[in-house]
Image: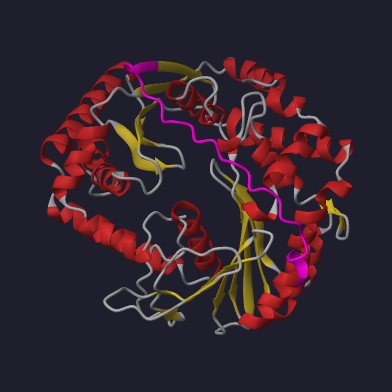
Amino acid sequence: MTRGRLFRILGLGLPLLLIAPHAVTAGEVEQGAEKPDTELAIEYERYTLDNGMEVILHRDTSAPLVAVNIWYHVGSGDEVPGKSGFAHLFEHMMFQGAKHIGEDVHFDILREIGGTGVNGTTNSDRTNYFETVPSHELETALWLESDRMGYMLDLLNEESLANQIDVVRNERRQRYDNVPYGRERFAVAAALYPEGHPYRYLTIGRHENLEAASLDDVISFFEKWYVPSNATLVLAGDLEIDEAKALVDKWFGSFPKLAKPEHVVVPAPELAKTVRTEIDDPFARLERMHFVWHSPAMLAEDDLELDVVAAALGSSGWGRLSKRLVDDEKIAQSVRVYQAGSGFSGSFSIIVTLSPGDGETKRAQAAKAIQEEVDKLVAEGPTKDELARHVISVESSFVWGLEELGGRANQLQWFNHYTGDPNYTDHYLERLRGITPAAVKAAAAKWLTKPRAEIISIPAPPDAKSDAKSDAKKGPK
């Protein structure tokens, strides 16, 4: 989702209300209430079922649709060594069927009732499932989500597990193993995170861990993480609040209250020195340099400030590094810079894809430019114009992202997951608009003067491609 978290609506006609947030306990209802001197925020009501499942309702009757969005608060960051890829594997398993739905008909049922935007995703922090349905079919969608929360194990067997393991492994081959710069992603993780750290293995998982997954492993994972107390359901759209509550209670209220699983916080590691890794990439046609530093977690101190650093360096057309390497010196084909915060910690990346030519010379020139531009930001910070341009870009892209019900539902989930408050808007807005060049300068000095990992992808000879494909089939680590 687009970085930048602002609910200021510019004439979109969305139902909004001023909200005074507070902590909510089981059985308590949180509703929108008037609060002076605040920005506008999406109207919502939040409450918790007796079994611990959190529910957030947002009413918008402008179209006869309801977005159904459920987050299970488990991702690859909760995995343990030897069981990488389980969170993502489960995203696939949840579409296989459940006791009352039947086997492999989830998509068919939603298609028949006019459902759209049906999917699920996994990252290091959470796994989500979502669809948008006609408002008169809301109960069907809740039945589907309820059945796989409560009765997925009833249809789980060796055959369905083996099938989805093959699907996930094939996905890894298609998106990671056999694509340009796919090896780079694994090399970055290996350079930044030691053995045992869950971020080392990527959400897709290792082939050998997926192959070794047993039925008992999968059952244990489900019973630990896929419990009501570890889930948040958001309904956004054409609904009557009381009727929606009754339906939620009907399909989820009878589930037992089970212990909420503990998330083990893994401290952010530090690099003792800058490390450099060169990769022979048989799928790449151009050399690429990926410099990456450890950085703050999502919404932690300096997270938003490093977003400004990334924009000042890498924005197409005006970013300092992009303009210098691509437009002026023509050393590179492209420059990409971004701050990526996650639940435990983050990473700050500068990726430069070099133009054809003398690779060794251009690598040296690009490395020199990267260091000089980073040093300049550390010493001087961004200009006021660069900062203002970034803030305007973040705000406008976010506003348009709220046009669709699914965007609003996901935003409520996002704030709720990372801050515990669906209406984190006020505080976020204060932080975003309160960023100063001096604060960005301080963040750059704090994080980008530390040791980093440097991953260099070098196109391999053509005959290495067949060897790479063979290695991928064997199941690379």
Give the mark count. Answer: 0
State left or right for residue 254 relative to residue 376: right
- Above or below, 17 against 163 in this view is below
Residue 428 visible? The answer is: yes
- Which range of residues does the magenta coloring cover? 250-276
Residue 255 falls inside the magenta stretch: yes
Q: Position of residue 105 (x, y in %)?
A: 84, 58
Q: Position of residue 242 (x, y in %)?
A: 65, 82
Indicate the quadrant where residue 219 lies: top right
Residue 343 falls inside the magenta stretch: no
The residue under the point 63% across, 44% down is 261
Name the image colouring: secondary structure
- Above or below, 70 against 278 in this view is below
Image quarter hosting the C terminus: top right
The residue under the point 78% across, 66% down is 143
Indicate the quadrant where residue 248 lies: bottom right
Q: Position of residue 258 (x, y in %)?
A: 71, 51
State left or right for residue 357 relative to residue 476: left
Task: Assign the magenta stretch its main secondary structure.
Answer: loop
Residue projecting furthest to the left: 380
Q: Position of residue 349 (x, y in %)?
A: 36, 35
The residue under the point 31% across, 47% down is 307
- Above or below, 333 against 368 in this view is below
Residue 329 visible? The answer is: no
- Above or below, 101 against 208 in this view is below
User: In the image shown, does 267 or 258 lie closer to the viewer?
Assistant: 258
